[in-house]
Each structure stands twice: as structure tokens, then as C-alpha cells.
Amino acid sequence: MKQLVNILFLIFLVSCGKTAHFEIKPHDTNEPRFSWNYESDAQNVKQISYRIIVASTENLALKGIGDLWDSGEVFSDKMLYIPYEGKPLQSRDKVFWKVFSTISYEKNKTVSVESDVKYFEISLLNSSDWQAQWIGHEFNDDVLVGKTRVAARYLRKEFKLDENIAEARLYVSGLGQYSAYINGVEVVPDELLKPALSDYRKRVYFNTYDVTEMLRSGDNAIGITLAGGRYTAMRRRTTNPDWDFTDNVLHFGTPRMILQLEITYDDGRKALIVSDETWKIANRGPIRTSNEYDGETYDENYDLGDWTVSGYDDACWSVAELVEAPAGMLTPQPNPNIKIQDTLIPVAIYKKGENWILDMGQNMVGVLQINLDGQQPGDTITMRFAENLYSDSTIDVRNLRGAEATDRYIVETRHGASPQWHPMFTYHGFRYVEIRGMRGIPSTEDFRGLVFYDEMQTTGTFETSDEILNAVYRNAYWGIRGNYRSMPTDCPQRDERMGWTGDRATGCYGESYIFDNHDLYAKWLDDGEDCQLESGSICDVFPPYWRNYTNSMTWPGAFITVADMIYTRFGDDKPIREHYPAMKKWLAFMKDKYMIDGIMYRDQYGDWCMPPESPELIHSRDRDRRTRKMVIATPYYCHLTKIMAKFAETLGFVDDAEYFNNEFEVTREAYNSKYLDHHIWRYDNNTVTANILPLYFGMVPEGHENDVFENIVERTEDLHGSHVATGVVGIQFMMRTLTEHGRGDLALTIASNDTYPSWGYMVRNGATTIWELWNGNTADPSMNSGNHVMLLGDLIIWEYEYLGGIRALEPGYKKIQLKPYPIKGLDHVNCTYNSVAGRIESRWKRHGSRFEWEITIPANTEAEVWIPTKNGYKVKTLGSGKYFFSSSIII
Ligand code: BGC
């Protein structure tokens, strides 16, 4: 079972004549949109028409009767986001749908195909749907640790049901985090850290589950474990004296929950169980304290027994109190929960003094499951998590700063420990674990690393003949998924774990190839909108758990670029439609407040993490390497106005499109006249970033692009020895700029270097993820996470779009460009991507000057295929199918 994620966006795949596979995706509206794609080996498959039927019963849908909506036959090749136009749908409606389509294939053959029947269900859309109330309890004996951790609450309720239960739905939210149990069984045990994070003053997410099978006639019990999560303690105090967020951290309150269980019997009768004062609550259960950053303490002496089954004696439990509802709107969660998606067995265990040290072999994100067999009453087993070791093989936790990252298990004094345990309400970023207090000689088999992140498909694969490129890609894969925590985080281990916007402004496009991250990022944009102040200012972190309203273009600019990613890569313009006014308001605010004569002066972070000149430094102090603030902020403003002009055109806002195009031109003029040296065609102090930004954004005066480009090459090669020469901002455009202007070889050198500074250097120094700093092995540990993805810049985009050569020419890959760049030094590239339009493949090999290329173009799309030859590219337009090309090239 998984969370029923409300109104659904559906994708189904049809192979010629046969139904293949459906996938249900979430949406939180009563205006569903329908999407599908085809799986077919036939060539030239094109959709001629489609018909969608939506029915109130499965039977009607099976018979092809759409009593709620019948689109009729629509002659169109559209297959993404087709809006429902039927009878209005209400909360709780269960709706069945099916698609019929006519397709042509090969040379004018046609066939009619139809999908299976699938269903979706509307969640609770209105506050009037809720009869439940928020409950909790202020306990005097909470086990508080530095005000950052409270004891978990246990809430329970028994109830009786009649026979013949037809359907049962559980709607539940628990703040900060909850887990639910019915009749002794956990509702989806592999989901953790739910519900999704939000600014609880604006929005609170609830989950929906089909629990029909978990209930029975007669006595039933439901139980909820509730932990503070980020609702109660955002983050432990920092130990870094430079960062004082005492007044800058939000706390929302003590844990609370709301729950509504709705049962429908075969004869249509209903029963309702809601959270209210009839519930019982206890805080003297085994989870004594928990906090995402610090870890969890579990004491078996407080074991509550079978508290989630009926007949349990809860006489000594307290009565739940009605508590104030969080100010935020109760909203169906639009994205899947975090789920265990991988399991690691440690690669080594060794003894160090009294302790055991466990090596997972991989810097992973999740929790450790431990076998406690053989532990004795009264034992305390303490697990401390770390990314690094000191040279004496003990754990190095300096880069965790104020996060304690420690789990504790206390074995019961009477009965002995239960065999397997993992914490419920915390997570760690770690490769190593120090285990104290464990008896016997544990083996690696006694442990499992449970790897979790937002449930989503892995959609891409990428592999080349270059081992460094492959290793870096693998590290990126681990780093990206380890930093999905219902928002993209900066890092998973230290006292931070925030949705830092700037880290993803461009990275999100690359990530979209590897993961189907549509829902995660669409939800993150809601967080972005929620954080906007009346003035228009947007926070640097979404949700704004840290109140960093510093007003840069680069960091909050992700509010615009992420929407562009969702539009161009997934073909979905809804985030643009929803957030366009807020984006426009933000840009107007920035312009009014910080722009003087066409120059944007405000910027907070600069070209963050530019490789510093000495191994201990975090930030470069060399003025020659640093790019000035307005030299970053002004081009970035141009970049964003260009995207906004495109959005305005898409939405049909003609005046706005003109306005933003004009903004671009005016700013470009002002910028060039102030910061471009028109004799030697250099921008400002000639850093690589100073030149890359205007060049990539199309700001350089026509005819002088190559002059500007030469500066980039010269600086990169001569001053930086063909290594990365930009910080987090410049690197977002570096690989593409070099390759577009004919220096793909230099891009490849940068990508396959293993000397400082490079991604390969990290690999050579044992990294299994991507570091926060290029000198992550030598710099000050206070800002030195081992698992940050911001330094990836546009590397992944370059790998898929330039090496593999897979690009969207139209939003959602309706029209594709396949254009690989064979670069000297690479003998083969294998790249596959399951796009929303279907599976795209590009695999090439080079033997001397012979170039062999296999491609797959998905059904109902068209590709502009650029075949490399001796005389440049030969371009063909092809319909779907698999093709093979062999050509002779000069390299
Ligand atoms: C975070 C970064 C973030 C930066 C901005 C750091 O502490 O880890 O990822 O973008 O701050 O200042």
C-alpha cells in the first residue's frame, strides 16, 4: 500500500494494440489532468486521435461509458496534461478512467489501442470536510534536551465496526512527524518522516491512505506515534560562533495531530472516527527524545506493549486535549512520502578501543538498522554517525557542527532486547558509525543501512568509456537522492539541511534526467510562494525555516528556473501559471529596491565556493579570483527576465512579454557599457564567471562572442591549469558554454581531471558523494559537508544533453533533438532517459574515425537527429523507432 495521493495525474503506457503499464501520480486538485505515453517498437508511431472517458464506476469504464466525462474523439497528438472537462468532482469521489486512441505506424498502417481502466480518488479538499480536531498534550515531564527534543507522544483510540466494510480511508497529519498503526500493523512501514515539510504557518500537509484491508468488524484500535520534527525544534543551536541564528529560527509548537478515519459499509452506511478529546495520549513511551539533527533515544524500559491493538489497558494514559490548529491550511499532500528505497550492508566492521566502527562503504542518507540479539538488560548501545574518519580510524564529526547525530538504544532491565531496531524520526548522512556499548562480536550482517528519500523513479542512466566521469556520475546519483527530503536540501548531515535555493537553480535540470523529480520540485515551488513576504521578497531557503531574506538574484532566482525546468523537461506549465504573479512581484521588488541605472547591486553570496588558492580556505580571498556582486547579480537578472518573457508568452501575456524582453535589452546595454571593456572584450576583472554569465545569457554584443569566449579559455587553461575556475554561479553554465563554443575537449578535461580542484579529485580522495568544497579534504570542517550537490553545476545537463545528446526541443520532449558531441578522449557514451514522452536512448561508440550510433525515439514524438560526419553534422527529422547510424568523423 502507498499513500493515496489525492487527485491524480496519470501516466499510462500502451504498446501497439496492447495495454502495458500504468503509473499513478499524485495531484492535489479536483481538476485532474490526464497524461500517457506509448511503448512500442514500431517505427513512426503517431497518435491520430484520442478519447478519454471518465466514469463513476469501474463497470461503466470497462464498457467504455464515460458518465462523468467523455472527451469524444479528439484529433490531436497531445498526450500530456489534458485537463478534465467533465462533471465537477467532489471530495472523496472515486473515479475510473480509460483512454482509447488511434495511432498510425510504419507506412500509414493504423490501429486502435486502448488502455486498462485505472482509478483515482479525490481527497478532502475543503475545510468543511474535516470533523476531526487537532489534539495533543502539554506534558510537564517531557524529556527535553536543550529545548530541542521532546519525548514522542503516543495517541490511541479504540472503536467498534460493523460487518461488511466496503471502503476505509485514513486522512492524517502529525506535526512534526508521525507514524500510524491500525490493529497492531503500521500503515506503510517503509514510509518515514511524514508528512512533507512546509511552512506550518501557511500550509500543513496531510496524507491519505486506503486502509480497508486493515480494519475488521468488531473491535479495532488505531495508534499514532508523534514526534516533534521540525515543527518543535527546527535545528539545534549552532556551535559555529560565526552563525548565530538564535532569533532567526522558527519554532512552531509542541507536537499535535489530526486524523479522520472514514468507513463505508457495503450498504452505503458510514462510520467516522476522528481525533478529539476521546483519544488517549502518553509521552512515557520508548522514544524518549528525537530530533532530525540529533538522533533518537529509544528506551525499552518504557515499552508500551501492544498499545495499537484493542483491549489494551490505557487507564494510566492522559486524555488528549484539543490544541490550537496550526495556522497553515490543511492541504492534501501533492507528492509522495519519503520511503526506504535501498538497503546497504556495511562493507567492514572493526574494533577501535571499546567501540566498534562500521563502514557502510558509501556516504548514505537514512538510518541504521541494528540487530540487538544478545544484548543484555540495562545495556545502552550508542551509535554516532559520521561522514569521515580521522587518520587513526576513529570517527571525525567536526563537520556536523551542532548536530549530534547520535542514536541510543537502552535495553530493558527485565526481558532483554528486541532483535531488530531502527529509529523512526531522525535521519543521518553518514558513511561511518561508531557503536558503543555493544556486546559480543558483531558482524556486518547485524546491520543494514536503510537508504531513504522521496519516492520517485530513477529515470536515467549514463555511462562512458571514462572511469572518472562514471565515478563522478555515481557520486552525483548518491548525492542527489540523499538530498531529497520533501524539498531539495543542501546537505543531510550537519545542523543545516535546508532547502537552499541557489544550490538547485540549475542543478535541478540535470537532476530531472536521473530522477522523476517533477512532484518534489512542484511542491518546492509552493514552499517558495508560501515564503514570499508582502514586499515581494523571497527567502534564500524554502520553506523559510531560516529567515534569510537577503535578496539576491541568484539564490531565490531558483523560484523561476525550477518552474522553467518543470515546464521544459516535464512539459507541465502549471507551476508557471500558479506562480507567475509571485515571480513577477519578486522581480519588481528587486528592481525597485536594488537596481540603479540598469545595474543590480544587491547580492549576498557572490560566486560561492570559488576554488580557493590555499587548501585550508573555504572562500578565496584573492580579489583576482572573486567576481563582484553586481557582475553576478545583473547578468542573472537578465537571465531571469528572459525566462519570464518566455513564461509571459506561454501564458499569452503579450504586454508582460514585451516588458521582460525590454528589461533584458535595457539591462544588457547598461551592463555592457559599464562592465565590458570594449577594447579587449573582457568583463570587469575578467574572471571566468564574469565572462561566462553574459556570454551564456546572450548579452555579449553581436560578433564579439568569440572574443569574450577566448578570455574564458585563456583564464581556465593558463591561470587554472584546465581546472574548474568558477564558483557555484559560474559553474551552472560552464560545461555548456565551453562545448557550445567548440571547446568540448576542455570541458572533458575539466570533467575527467583528478587533480585539485575537480570532481575527480574528490573521487581520488575517496569521496562517494559530491563535496561542498573543492578542497573538502583539507578545508576548515565548519563548512565542509561531504554531501552537497551544488558544485555539480551543469555537469549532469552536459552529460545528457551534449555527450549523450538528448535534448527537449519542445516542452516535455514532444520534439526531441538528438545531437551527440563526440569528443576526443571518449570512446563510447551510453545514455538512456525515460522522459514523460517515453524512452529515449542514445548510445555511441567510436573506433578511430568511425562513429557508430544507436538511438531510440519514443512513439508519438519526432526527433531532429544530428549525425556527426566529416563535414559537420547531417540533420534528419525522424519519427519514432530504433535507428542505427555509422559515419566517418574527424576528431
Ligand atoms: C549551505 C549552502 C548554501 C549556502 C549559502 C551554506 O551553508 O550549505 O548550500 O547555498 O550556505 O550561503
Image: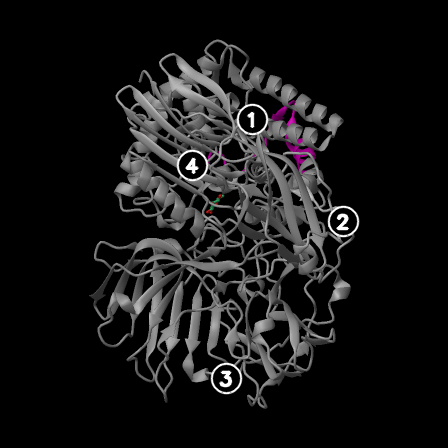
Residue 134: say if magenta. Answer: no
The amino acid type of the residue labelled 1 equals: Pro
Q: Is residue 303 visible?
A: yes
The amino acid type of the residue labelled 2 equals: Gly
Q: Position of residue 177 (x, y in %)?
A: 55, 66
Q: Earlier in the sequence, mark 2 or mark 1?
A: 2
Residue for point 62% across, 27% down: 642
The amino acid type of the residue labelled 4 equals: Ile
Disc 1: which residue: 635
Q: Earlier in the sequence, mark 1 or mark 3?
A: 3
Q: Magenta span covers which residues? A: 586-609
The circle drawn on residue 86 is: 2
Disc 4: which residue: 796
Q: Earlier in the sequence, mark 3 or mark 2?
A: 2
Q: Position of residue 505 (x, y in %)?
A: 53, 38
Give the spatial CA distance, label 3 vs label 2: 48 Å
Disc 3: which residue: 306
Residue 430 quadrant: bottom left
Q: Is residue 531 visible?
A: no
Residue 598: say if magenta. Answer: yes
Q: Is residue 453 left or right of residue 213?
A: left
